[in-house]
Image: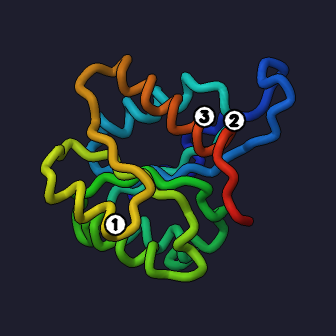
Amino acid sequence: MTDRDASDREPDSSDEGRTVNADILLVEDNPGDVRLLREALEATEIPHRLHVVTDGSDALDFVYQREGFDDVSQPDLILLDLNLPQTDGHEVLNELKSDSQHGRIPIIVLSSSSEEGDIRRAYAAGANAYLTKPVDPNELVDRVELIETFWFSLAHLPE
């Protein structure tokens, strides 16, 4: 199941000359978390398009532009849950980070798990960051804003 371009945040006069229009892929199967993350992303000032898929298989199809996703833009950032139906987040992370063409895409793991084993496994597979989902929605907004600011305003990534 997908929800493509569900949250288009286009540049406006308050964006003070920012030219970023990031494509963000959210891989999350929990509708409540999708809603909270969408709201958190909408609260930021960085123009973006949010694409949502609800399982690991669709995430891989999206990135590889296959199985109905042949017209989508490559994501500039992936927000990945680990506990997903079909192909889990660890498998998605392993496959994408081992692919020479797509391994450069920053992948931020957003998980409810704070288990040391999950964290180590995610970093060993190439996760760029591992964040636990906070219970407080305001804290989630703050974290998402920091993620966007870092990856789209501060970090320099190869083309």
71 sits to left or right of 68: right
Report if residue 2 is visible in the image: no
| Residue assigned mark 2 | 47
101 sits to left or right of 78: right
* Quarter-of-image position of residue 127: bottom left
Q: Can you give x and y, in whole percent of width and height, for residue 108 in the image? A: 42, 51
Q: CA distance from mark 2 to mark 1?
A: 26 Å
| Residue assigned mark 3 | 149
129 sits to left or right of 32: right
Q: Secondary structure at mark 1?
A: helix
Q: Residue at x 66, y 40 (%)?
A: 154
Residue type at numbered disc 1: Gly
Q: Can you give x and y, in whole percent of width and height, for residue 11 in the image? A: 78, 31
Residue type at numbered disc 3: Thr
Q: Can you give x and y, in whole percent of width and height, for residue 42 in the image? A: 55, 28
Q: Are marks 2 and 3 in contact (CB under 8 Å)?
A: no
Q: Can you give x and y, in whole percent of width and height, for residue 77 in the image? A: 55, 53
Q: Tell me the crowding category of disc 1: few under 14, some 14 to 19, or many 20 or more residues within 10 angstroms, Cα based.
A: many
Q: Tell me the crowding category of disc 3: few under 14, some 14 to 19, or many 20 or more residues within 10 angstroms, Cα based.
A: some
Decide: is 44 above or below 22.
above
Quadrant (top left, top right, bottom left, bottom right) of the C terminus:
bottom right
Q: Tell me the crowding category of disc 2: few under 14, some 14 to 19, or many 20 or more residues within 10 angstroms, Cα based.
A: many
Q: Are marks 2 and 1 in contact (CB under 8 Å)?
A: no
Decide: is 111 above or below 66.
above
* Quarter-of-image position of residue 7: top right
Where residue 56 is drawn, which disc sits there? 1
Residue type at numbered disc 2: Pro
Q: CA distance from mark 3 to mark 1?
A: 26 Å
Quadrant (top left, top right, bottom left, bottom right) of the N terminus:
bottom left
* First in residue order: circle 2 vs circle 1: 2
Q: Secondary structure at mark 2?
A: loop
